[in-house]
Image (cartoon, rainbow, N blue to C red):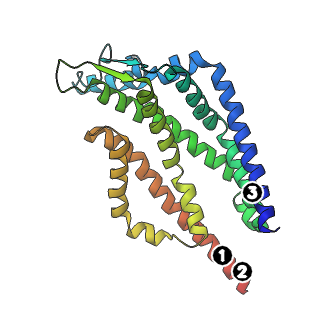
Amino acid sequence: MSFLDHLEDLRWHLLRATLAIMIGGAIAFGMKSFIFDVVLFGPKQSDFYTYRLLCNISEYFNMQESFCFDELPFRIQSRTMAGQFSAHIWTSITAGFIIAFPYVIYQFWAFIAPGLQSTEKKSARGFIFVTSFLFFLGVLFGYYVITPLSVNFLGSYTVSTEIFNDFDLSSYIGLVRASVLASGLIFELPVIIYFLTKVGLVTPEFLRKNRKYSLVFILIISALITPPDIASQVIVAIPVLVLYEVSIFISRFVIRKERKKEKQKNK
């Protein structure tokens, strides 16, 4: 295929992926009450699953004041004429992207697969499943861990009793969206390491050698996407560290497989 043919092929894959996102967004648009009242505003309620779990844990350690509360001291408001409608549209698109993520990844894979050898296609057969699984796992982690920690800390933080927190709707939704999507992308680390190892940019020795620098980087990322308290940063950093160790194992597995192929060729 010529360069222009590749561009044409890419255009159709992007159009299909966009159409899937729009269909998912349309479904989410029609589920307004569930998306907003149950999903988005769930972390604002005191009976949210994460708060109940953390409350039980804090009670066990005699720290009831940390996560046991009846109501978060803030309200959400919309201060523009089109604020609620815009929030509905963009939230639906975000939900559509999450729903259609496996198909979006499939379109990406369908574009690059013709350029791979048959052995490479076989070795990456579970690419769509693994990538989607890690993304959804990250989304759930962002929603049930990062979001409630952030909402609880920022929603109850105050510098004076004279100030009441009235948060704009777009600000609240932006916090939830950033927490969920950032976590979903971070959980793709093993997949990224797999491909970087395949092209020779990363080795398990390199990952092990730079583990201490990676730890600092992970703590910085955790600090950026969580409230500025040590407990929240540690809670977020632990699964990312586990993913990093898994990535080292995956990189070692890929290197071993490549060396076996080279030995078979030399025989």
Q: Which residue is the site of mark 2?
A: 264
Mark carried by residue 112: none
Q: Residue 254's x, y, as percent?
A: 60, 67
At label 1, which amino acid type do we have? Lys
**Badge 3 or badge 2: first in the primary sequence:** 3
Residue 180 position in % (x across, y down): 49, 37
Q: Secondary structure at mark 1?
A: helix
Separation of marks 2 and 1 at Cα, in angstroms: 6 Å
**Along the polypeptide, which appears first: circle 3 or circle 1?**
3
At 39% from the left edge and 19% from the top edge, which residue is drawn?
A: 76
**Cα–Cα gap, marks 3 and 1:** 28 Å
Is residue 133 shown left or right of residue 243? Answer: right
Residue that numbered label 3 is attached to: 111
Q: Nearer the viewer, residue 106 or 247?
A: 106
The amino acid type, in three-letter code, at marker 3 is Phe
* x then y, percent, for residue 253: 58, 65
* Other-residue count near label 2 (Cα within 10 Å), few / some / many at <14 / 14–19 / ≥20: few
Judged from this view, the residue extending furthest toward the front is 81
Residue at x 71% of width, y 86% of height:
266
Marks 2 and 1: CB-CB under 8 Å? yes
Left or right: 187, with 234 as reference point: right
Q: Quadrant of the C terminus?
A: bottom right
| Tag 1 residue | 260
**Position of 166 relative to 114 (above/below):** above
Marks 3 and 2 sit apart, C-alpha to C-alpha, by: 30 Å
